[in-house]
Image: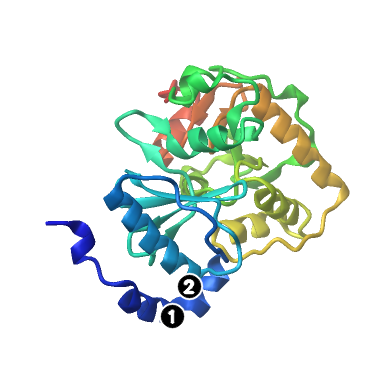
Amino acid sequence: MNFTHTRPGLKARAAHVALAMTGAATVLTLGVAAVTALPANAAGLASDVAAALKLRLPKTPVDALTCDTLGPWCEVVSGDTLFYIDETARYLFVGRLYDMEERRDVTAARLLELNPDLLAAGGARARSEQNETTSSVAPAKVDLASLPAEGAIRWGNPKGARLVVFSDFQCGYCQRLAGELVKAKVQVEERPISIFGAASRQLSETVLCAKDPTKALHAAYAGELEANGKSCAKAKALDANESFAKTNGFAGTPVIVRASDGAVLHGFRDAQTLRAFAAGEKGPRS
């Protein structure tokens, strides 16, 4: 059966889309500029999704849209932002997409392809390295001594072992990790980096410059904090965080560093693993 014959027509879909336009526009505003060249059936699906996106999210141009490589998700490129939407154009996902079989961060690799100079790319790394796991190109240990105190939000258990976390407040795995860090009862030194570009940087500045940065941090992860466009002197220290991440090849977030010896873990970990790692036990690097 040809899938294109069983999908609802655009008129029917548009009726459903119109009902949700107001709410969707508060999440992200997009228009449609281009659909990536695809085989006929995938191109038809992408065209339908593009049309639905234009109705739901009409204001920000979409530079590319493809629906043939990531299972039920379509990839949407808008400037230096990458996000995913399902084939019905109902559910929008902003965050890190991981390939569990190939053990790689699909989002980081794609961002590198789109912009080789992006922080997530690690700068001058060759494109042939895009499909390697983060652990194969980043060091097992780092020296934290060069990082300024002003670039961190300190929270958690002040009596616990200290973990330094490089994160992006728009990263879904970072949000999940924050909850596990609370359960692990460790002391956290969170250092924001701008994996998702300018929007992430503005949100990081809003958190760091807030009257109560810890409260602002958790509000950001909960989606309850908007970037206010205001900065402050200590926000300049975010440059050091990003330079450190780039120098050490941090190709995604979160990255967890044990303060006692600089040992590195990449990616989300549960509370039990975090407690063991903070206590000095070796953890998996992938």
Residue 246 appears in which quarter of the rendering? Answer: top right
Q: Is any atom of residue 274 visible in this view?
A: yes
Q: Residue at x 64, y 21 (%)?
A: 124
Packing grade of label 1 (10 A; few <14, some 14-19, many >=20) is few
- Which part of the image, by quadrant, shows the C terminus? top left
Residue 106 image offset from top left, x and y in percent? 43, 36
- Farthest left residue in view: 1
- Type of residue at label 1? Ala
Q: Residue at x 75, y 51 (%)?
A: 205
Residue 138 image offset from top left, x and y in percent? 55, 20
**In-image side of 53 versus 48 (left or right):** right
Residue 284 image offset from top left, x and y in percent? 40, 23
Residue tagged 2: 55
Q: Residue at x 54, y 61 (%)?
A: 222
Residue tagged 1: 18
Q: Nearer the viewer, residue 48 or 148?
A: 48
Q: Is any atom of residue 164 visible in this view?
A: no
| Vertical position of residue 211 compared to residue 14: above or below | above
- Farthest front residue in view: 40
**In-image side of 215 versus 284 (left or right):** right
- Type of residue at label 2? Leu
| Vertical position of residue 31 compared to residue 79: above or below | below
